[in-house]
Image (cartoon, helix red, strand yellow):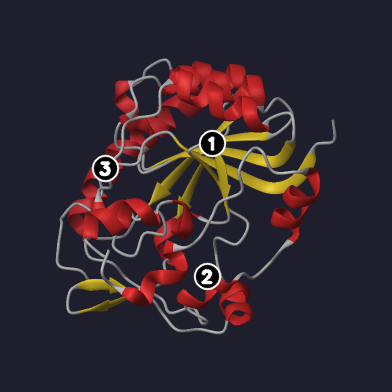
Amino acid sequence: MQRFSLLALEYHVAHGCNLSCQQCSHYGNFHLAGKLPTLADAESEYSRWSHRLKPTRFALLGGEPLLNPAILEHIQLARKHWYDSDLMLVTNGFFLHRFPELPRVLVDTECQLEISQHGTHQDYLERFRDVKAIVWSWRTQYPKLCINIRKSHKGWMRQYKIVDGMPMPFNSEPDAAYRVCMQRTCTQLVNGRLAKCPALAYWPQLETKARLESISEWDLFRSYEACPPTASDDELRSFLETKSIPQCALCPSRRVAFRHPSPLQRSNLQ
């Protein structure tokens, strides 16, 4: 069977997050509800797609993936299914200390550890020093371990507007919004289906959490249908090759830098 190539495929190992980074493209600051995917859940979802897709990169993330106590087994399972992809674990690092066996598993599965730094607020940096201390220790103990600290806050941008304390969409030209989108290659595997981006994949949970059910401006997101595993090869090819879609109109058409408040504190939406 033909396997279709794509740049990246991402999977939420946890929807919740211990940080509150406003304007998170995965809506992590809303602390979305949703059970932690079990190994059986992931096995079922991977089995539907791993024989049809060949992502250059497969990333386990969230939310905060280290909130899932079975994260070590999830990494091993991901490597089993996505055997010829670059495997990556993306985390804010605050719970690295809970998993002393993590570096060994990362080395064994050839999985890169990607640590996201979320700001330069003093209270945050004091906590992040502990994360970096663990990283430096692991680098010494495991020379083959690939670790990168990405300064995510430097590329942070506004994802939606805030009107009367509520998240509201933009009104953009879809092609223009797609051109500036930083998630345009971040296909999500969610509930067994492929979603074009995080904003669409997890919007149903945001709708419930933020009580957006009566806001018609979000109708395009509300009507979005992700690609099912029953899709034909032609339908899957079309999904992967299509660039902008009507839903892109609800995203910004220019990049507006956003400096979020301290991610350690929950604050009013900005």
- Compared to residue 79, the image places residue 205 above or below, namely below
Query: In this figure, which residue is indicated by the disc labeled 1?
Result: 192
Report how far apart the C-alphas of labels 1 and 2 lie in the structure. 21 Å
Crowdedness of circle 2 by 10 Å Cα count: few (<14), some, many (20+)?
Answer: many
Give the residue type that dot 1 points to.
Gly
Task: Determine the residue positioned at 55% across, 29% down.
Answer: 45
Return the x and y of residue 176 as percentages of the image width and height: 60, 81
Dividing the picture into quadrants, the one containing residue 83 is: top right
Query: In this figure, which residue is indicated by the disc labeled 2?
Result: 247
Crowdedness of circle 1 by 10 Å Cα count: few (<14), some, many (20+)?
Answer: some
Give the residue type that dot 2 points to.
Gln
- Relative to the observer, which residue lies in front, 253 or 52? 52
Return the x and y of residue 159 as percentages of the image width and height: 40, 70
Residue at disc 2, secondary structure = helix
The quadrant in which the N terminus is found is top right
Left or right of 221? Residue 76 is right
Return the x and y of residue 98 as percentages of the image width and height: 30, 22
Query: In this figure, which residue is indicated by the disc labeled 3?
Result: 33
Upstream in sequence: badge 3 or badge 2? 3
Report how far apart the C-alphas of labels 1 and 3 lie in the structure. 18 Å
Upstream in sequence: badge 1 or badge 3? 3
